[in-house]
Amino acid sequence: QVQLQESGPGLVKPSGTLSLTCAVSGGSISSSNWWSWVRQPPGKGLEWIGEIYHSGSTNYNPSLKSRVTISVDKSKNQFSLKLSSVTAADTAVYYCARAFAVLGSWYDYWGQGTLVTVSS
Amino acid sequence: DIQMTQSPSSLSASVGDRVTITCQASQDISNYLNWYQQKPGKAPKLLIYDASNLETGVPSRFSGSGSGTDFTFTISSLQPEDIATYYCQQYDNLPRTFGPGTKVDIK
């Protein structure tokens, strides 16, 4: 059973960089899956941030592309998110998720989510 | 980006009722449409993939249909544990996009 666990600071200052890691257990990050980040502002809907394949190939949401970097660490079986120049609008619960198969289709495994608040 | 709309935005129904939610895509997405259930404070849970396929372990009262731009999600007999927000999601194009959600509660 694949499990994903997000970790990182819960509070980030405005104009700073949000950094989160998603540890994958019960499966290999080098499997034929895309690994994704999705966020949800309090009381709002889901927004796709981007995804990475174990080869290092990435896809980002154009609305965030200039500020987002997703990377993978195969030795630690984890992947990471960095979001720069954050504002209060970036306050959200951040989820990591696995997309089934190479096509990056549906999200069959999710982390429990971690709330990141942007505030001074 | 492909825009996803859902209706209604919320609904109240009685236990045992049939509940239907619609999702519309701004362009043809074939059957590349998934449905998730999200309960308060929890991560989304995959229910239906490729418009009509039931994820393993999901009760058969949940179903989905449609293709192209118009999709339907149905709970055949609403149960108290189905209280949640339901989201559709397309994966035909990047960026992946979700519908705004439909909140379901018990009347």
Image: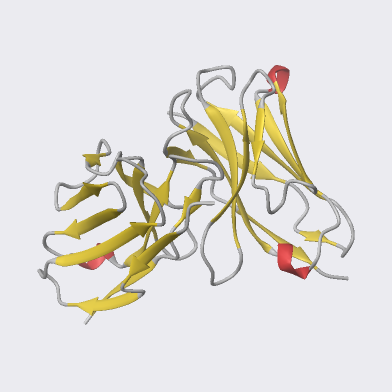
The relative height of residue A12 versus residue A76 in the rendered view (above or below) is below
Task: Indicate the quadrant where residue B14 lies.
Answer: bottom left
User: Residue B69 vs residue A70: left or right?
Assistant: left
User: Residue A69: x and y, percent?
Assistant: 77, 39
Left or right: A90 with respect to B27?
right
Is B2 placed above or below B103 here? above
Question: Would residue B103 be found to the left or right of residue A5 on screen?
Answer: left
Residue occupying image coordinates x 44% and y 52%: B44
Report x, y in % for residue B24: 34, 59
**In front: B33, or B38?**
B33
Does A73 appear above or below B28?
above
Tell me where residue B80 appears, x and y as whole percent.
22, 68
Q: Residue at x 41, y 56 (%)?
A: B26
> Where is residue B76, by image quadrant?
bottom left
Q: Nearer the viewer, residue A76 or B92?
A: B92
In-image side of B57 versus A28 (left or right): left
Q: x and y percent of residue B105 in the render?
A: 29, 75
Q: Quadrant of the C terminus of chain B?
A: bottom left
Q: How is the image coloured?
A: secondary structure
| Residue drawn 22% across the image and 42% down it | B52
